[in-house]
Each structure stands twice: as structure tokens, then as C-alpha cells.
Amino acid sequence: MSHRLDEFWKVTLESESIVWCTRTSKPYLSLFALDEALVLLYGRLVGIDRSEHSILLDLRHGPRSNHGEWTAGALLHHRRRLIRGFRRAGFLVLTPDQAEPIPRPLDPEHPEVQLFRDPDRARGALRLPRQGKNAMPA
């Protein structure tokens, strides 16, 4: 592989059980670079228990682009793969077109994707209630 994940994405685990994936401003210069970066991102998420977390793809700093069909198809494939198995999923954007194409739920393993413009609203909507012995009383 010729690229590093941190060239395109920063991944942090928020205390609210949210996996926050932030897109950098570096553009994908080819379909190969896009594919490689999203395979690296998927690999970074492999060790995370998706059933106990939400995922937020923060696209606000990503470069603006008009996705051609070749890019849209690749993005849709990878985005479906990235969100699969998470309890909740969202995109944080400046404009709605940044989130295109939006993966729609295909089966129970794919959560409904929510769009956000405000990080605090995203955090609130994607936060999961604690479970187990450290759960807050109802």
C-alpha cells in the first residue's frame, strides 16, 4: 500500500461510545487512492465491537468534489461496508451533497444513516446508553 490512513482519515473513540472518523482535506487523486484509503479505514475499525458503538463520518474538512459515477459507486460500496454492524451511523457535513452517496439500510446489519451539520447534535443523537454494571439507573 502506498498511502497511510492518517493522510485521509483520523479515527478517535469518543467517551460516548462513538467512533469518530474525520476526513482530512487531502483529495483522493485516483480511484485507487480512494479504495486504498477506505480499505485502511475499514481495517482500523476491525477491532471495534460495532454492536456497542455508533459511527460518525465527519466529512466537513474533506475536499469539495463532484463525484462521477466511478467515484460514487466506490464510495457507496465502502460506506455500506464501514457502517455495517454499528448501532447507529451518521455523517457530519457542511452541505448535504458532501454525504452523497448515502448508504440506505439493506438489512438489519445496516443502520439508518443520519445527516448532521452540528457536531453537538451528532454527538447527542449517536450517543448510546450505557449497558451492564456501569449503566445509569433508569
Image (spheres, rainbow, N blue to C red):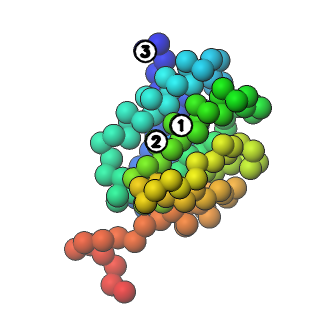
Q: Is residue 29 left or right of residue 53?
A: right
Which residue was labeled with disc 1? 77
Q: Position of residue 31 (x, y in %)?
A: 60, 20
Observer able to see residue 54: no
Between the C-alphas of marks 3 and 2, the distance is: 20 Å
Rendered-image quadrant of the C terminus: bottom left
Look at label 2 and name its amino acid. Answer: Arg
Disc 1 on helix, strand or loop?
A: helix
Q: Which mark sits nearer the N-terminus, 3 or 2?
A: 3
Q: Residues within 10 Å of mark 2 (few under 14, many from 20)?
A: some
Foreground mark, 3 or 1?
Answer: 1
Q: Which residue is mark 3?
A: 1
Q: Look at the numbered discs 1 and 2 and tell me whether their residues touch, using CB distance below 8 Å.
A: yes
Dot 2 corresponds to which residue? 81
Can you say whether 123 is above or below 56 in the image?
Answer: below
Q: Could you tell me residue 70's position as x and y percent?
A: 66, 26
Q: Residues within 10 Å of mark 1 (few under 14, many from 20)?
A: some
